[in-house]
Image: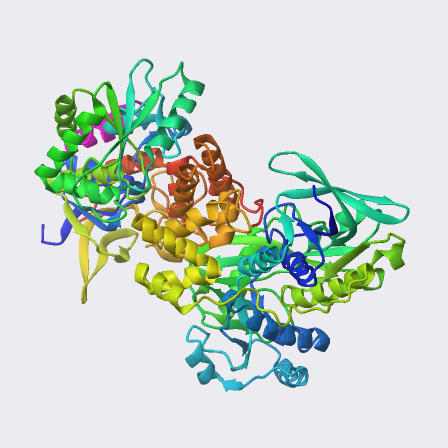
Amino acid sequence: MEPAQVVIIGGGATGAGILWDLSLRGISATLLEQGDIANGATGRCHGLLHSGGRYAVKDTDTARECLAESRIIKAIAPHCVDDVGGLFVQCAQDDPAFFDQWWRAAAAAGIRSRRLNADEARELEPSLAASILGAFTCPDAHVDVFRLVLANLEAAVARGGRFKTYSKVTNIHTANGRVRGVRYRNTLSGEEHEIPCEMVINAAGGWAQSIAALAGVEVPIYCDKGTLLVLNHRLNRRVINRCRKSSDADILVPAGPVCILGTSSTRVPGPDGLTASAEEVDRLLRLGEEMIPGLVDTRILRIFCGVRPLYAPKTTEAAKGREISRGFALLDHETRDGVGGFVSIVGGKLTTYRLMAAEVCDCVAKKLGVDAECATDKTPLRPAIDRKTHQRALHLLPHPVADKMERRLGPEVLRVIQAIEARPELAELVCECELVTRGELEHVLGGTTPVPAYTISDVSRRTRLGFGPCQGTFCGYKAMLAGYQTQCWTAAEAANKFSAYLHERSKGQSFIHQGKQLEQLELNHDLYGAEQAFCAKPGVQDGN
Amino acid sequence: MGINRYDVVVVGAGFSGLVAAGVAAHRKLKVALVATGAGSFVTGPAWLKAQEIQQASAAPDLGEAIAYFCELASLAGCLYAGDISVTRFLPSILGDFHSVALAPLTLWNAEPRKGISTAIVGVRGLSSFDENFMAERLTEQARLITSGCTYTARQISLSRDMGVPVTTLRVAQCFDRDSAFREELLNALRAAASGFERILLPGILGLETSAEQIAVFERELGCQVGEIPTLPPSIPGLRVYHHLESYLHRIGVELYRGFPVNKVEIQNGLCTGIQVDSTGHPLNLHCRSAVLATGRRTANPLGGEYAGCDQQMRPLTSTGSVMARNLFVAGPLPHSSAGDHGNVMYILTGYRAGSLTASTRGNHAA
């Protein structure tokens, strides 16, 4: 394996952000991720690009950081952001003193907000309960987390950055008090490789503790589990926050054609093998119902869990999940533990990933003697699509399909357009919920993209295929056939990949014991003999 | 008996409801079948899995119920093959084999047979089925379960413009409606089938096709013809539904298709009727007894009071009292316990509910 100046461990938003930042500064770097992109906390959150409102009362610094960073992300990655705005809703059940506190704190943090009375709020969001007292507006937004990570990686690759998915770090070599290289295993092939390097950045989120342990360093991480529900309908246009001290089920984020309700907060020992309990799901629904009547009757597409990997040095040990700061920490293990060339970036949140990356990279650049400044706040993640290409797409595909495809692929869209022009049958919609064409599917499978897809789940994260009501039953099957037809996989490989995909999808559907989604599960069983989630005991299934 | 008066009103047109309506009608009762649409079995292959038969094997009336179902299907024109005591491996959409006890004849014809040369025939443009994938997988999988059977992929092209992409439903509709299309398909298949003793197609052979028509098709082609399940729309599933429903209509069952149920009328522990929603005004279907076979996916017509059933399939409240003595629940309702799913269980409970309605006849004056 080619040596790199820096090895980054962790393919979430932070790791991808670091790869992009280093690549912009001309530092050669390789990113290693044990699964696929956004495998940890990044891929298992609301996708809320915080305006800072959520932290205004508790933590003004974090609120300010969120506000500044969300503005930057909206500017550098508009194709990843759905800038819907948000509301902080005053529920009759909640403490009215907090409403005023929030209003003052938001102003102090510089968050632009308007006070709405109940009628105005319900005019904007008709599904809100009649009992609400009013609402404050805020500039919250939804960010497609997979797209954001991809955008960072693609931009980095264009500048010479390298990354490897399905590469689990097994060892960090140190000699004479410095890191010398990293050993990793390809989890698909089982092969082991080694990369010599000058520095290692630990951006492994929930796994940061175990990565640090490989270099003999202790990094205390508090894993705080949150459970989220994906609902079939987009019940809200804006992000709806409940205006109270952070608690369960107080954020509902519109995400494409669905919306996501969450979360809960429970300490768990580690980031693997997360489970949601039936009580947790019922509780989320019940609480959600207080803000949005009728929510309990909507179709739940899936249930998933993620961890907030919070940094928990001894002094904060006594605090509980939600009380630990959402701020982040940069640990220089050279000064802290005597391991040269090793740094960890821990804590923080999705919205501040770029800032976290910038701080690590400042530190790393200094150590490497590179004096380039951070430019990620001013550099768009990808160039805009030219008008001619846009016109060509509109000639081939319905407007919403062309629009989604452009947002997903950027200038790469040209390849798909050319393919559809040559073979019109590629215009077929394979995923009708997320509007994925066969052309786009074959493009993602084709191996010419900067971020290759190895499994059907990888394809889902690249295209959002299978994120709708069928949860991959139909479109996942077609993706399997496409993988076979494009000769990426043999028939047996394709079938195995599809079974693994169905299994992964079914994990998130274990509590669904009635309604339309049950019909979908019964159908999966009929068609594929798929493991039937509702045969299992409720309450013991994995998350995402 | 008045215009809206029935001996039995059955709600739901899945396997439970169709079988219950059949049993009641065969016992000379006046039956209404109310449903918002077809039951969910139509999206799948409509076969009965061996495992489900085994799970239900403790039921003394299983054999009777399944025999009745086969007879009903046969009278309706869609032959089922198999028996509760047999297990066959039938190809699934994923190109592996599922253990099945009974299946519609065309699907049954696809079982692996040693020494029978078999072609998997795809249709150009039908994007949800890939004959090469299927042939490669089935050959591989057949090696695991029997002494082997090889499958060869063939493709046919049809001149008719059936849109892009071609769907199984589109092909099946053309097959039903257009004799010229059937002729063209037959000719194309003749070429593809030459040299083979059996051809397997994705499920496309019409929604209304009877067992006799398939037999004629086989004679014309000079080889056996089978179907492999596909993604929905599943033609074999829809075909079973079509045949059963038309047959029930022919023997006098009145169909209320597309009518959602407003409420179940219960007075003094007896169900007096089912109120359905028809445009503009509710319609009361009076009955001597009723069967609820609405499944777990729609709202429970009995509302939140319902808390399960007793041994005679009568609905109970949470305190354990019978909600109505002449009302029977076939198949699961929302919030019922796990495990009671599957076509076998639906047929069995439908059969029982239908029989119970017959035995409660004349319990009260409607």
Main secondary-structure element of the magenta-colored stretch: helix
Q: Quadrant of residue B113?
A: top left
Q: Is residue A535 left or right of residue B50?
A: right
Q: Nearer the viewer, residue A372 or B98?
A: A372
Q: Is residue B94 magenta?
A: no
Q: Is residue B81 magenta?
A: yes
Q: Nearer the viewer, residue B359 or A14?
A: A14
Q: Nearer the viewer, residue B13 or A471?
A: A471
| Residue B19: image location, x then y, percent | 24, 37
Instruction: Please state the extent of the stretch shown in magenta in the rendering.
Output: B65-84
Q: Is residue B114 left or right of residue A199?
A: left
Whether residue A61 is visible, yes or no, is yes
* Vertical placement of residue B346 versus B147, above or below: below
Residue at left offset 40%, top offset 42%: A482
Residue at left offset 55%, top offset 77%: A139
Residue at left offset 67%, top offset 75%: A63
| Residue B255: image location, x then y, percent | 16, 48
| Residue A498: image location, x then y, percent | 46, 39
* Vertical placement of residue A500 versus A409, above or below: above
Picture mark count? 0
| Residue B9: image location, x then y, percent | 21, 48
Q: Is residue A16 left or right of residue B209?
A: right
Q: Nearer the viewer, residue A423 or A428?
A: A423
Whether residue A90 is visible, yes or no, is no
* Vertical placement of residue A327 versus A194, above or below: below
